[in-house]
Image (tube, rainbow, N blue to C red):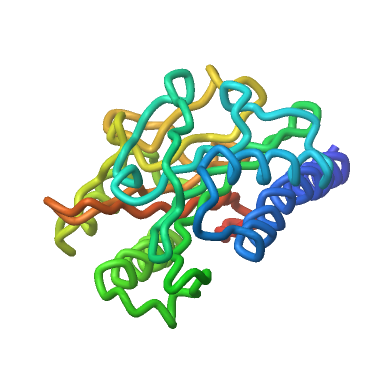
Amino acid sequence: MEATEDLNFVEGVMQYTEVQNIAKKTIEFIKDNIQPGMTLLEVRHLCETKMMELGADSFWYWDVGAFVFAGDETTLSVSGKEYTTSERVIAENDIITIDLSPQNEDTWGDYARTIIIENGKVVETDNVTNDEWKKGLLMEEYLHEEMCKFVAPETTFEELYYHINGIIEEKGYINLDFMGNLGHSIVRQKNDRIYIEKGNQICLGEVHYFTFEPHISVQGSKYGYKRENIYYFENGEIKEL
């Protein structure tokens, strides 16, 4: 029985890794192809077409494969049920958040990044010259590092919620998520998700996979930041898909 469970675990990780890699490759693709003058609808179309080319057969979150926001829209947090892609055009210097939801059969990917364009080109974090944007990206990386240090299989969703929101506040940022949460379990049906939120006493180790996706800003700023990965535990150690 134990050998079968181990095999199922390995197969599951492989399946989810494959779909998550569709999202990761799509972000790299869009970094190479996004240009000032493009509309957000064009960016969304490029992302969704690329995910299908890479093996997605559908999009699990309200049939939207790519949620795309730019400029002061990056602070918006809306349900997928209510999302519409704006007619905004990407500027020479801009901030864009892309959140991807590929699916293959009933296996999900879930991956988001905030991308910076300066002088018409995508710029990696270390080379961003806009100090506010650079600090926001670095804060996102820091939150993921702190999450990985803090959690164990017996950590509850609520404990993680309070710990990370405490850091967000301490560092002078705010949580923009419209439900106040920081991520959710990865399941087969979207209505079965449980969240990193107040009151959730379920342990992280009781779910197979979960996302961590703090959506943050500085109070009064026009700009928001998001970074999302899927995580799981293997032999008690946190791993990223």
Q: Position of residue 27 (x, y in %)?
A: 63, 56
In this picture, residue 126 sits left or right of residue 39 = left
- Residue at 39% x, 39% y is 157
- For residue 151, above or below residue 65: below
Closer to us: 41 or 58 = 41
In this picture, residue 144 sits left or right of residue 235 = left
Which image quadrant: the N terminus? top right
Closer to us: 54 or 44 = 44
- For residue 133, above or below residue 65: below
- Residue at 31% x, 67% y is 133
Using the rendered image of the protein, determine whether residue 12 is visible from the camera's viewpoint.
yes
- Residue at 39% x, 60% y is 94
Q: Position of residue 180 (x, y in %)?
A: 28, 35
- For residue 225, above or below residue 92: above
- Residue at 63% x, 34% y is 65
Query: Residue pushed farthest front?
Result: 37
- Count the marks: 0
Q: Quadrant of residue 2?
A: top right
Using the rendered image of the protein, determine whether residue 149 is visible from the camera's viewpoint.
no
Which image quadrant: the C terminus? bottom right
Closer to us: 164 or 220 = 220
Q: Position of residue 184 (x, y in %)?
A: 47, 36
Q: Position of residue 143 (x, y in %)?
A: 36, 61
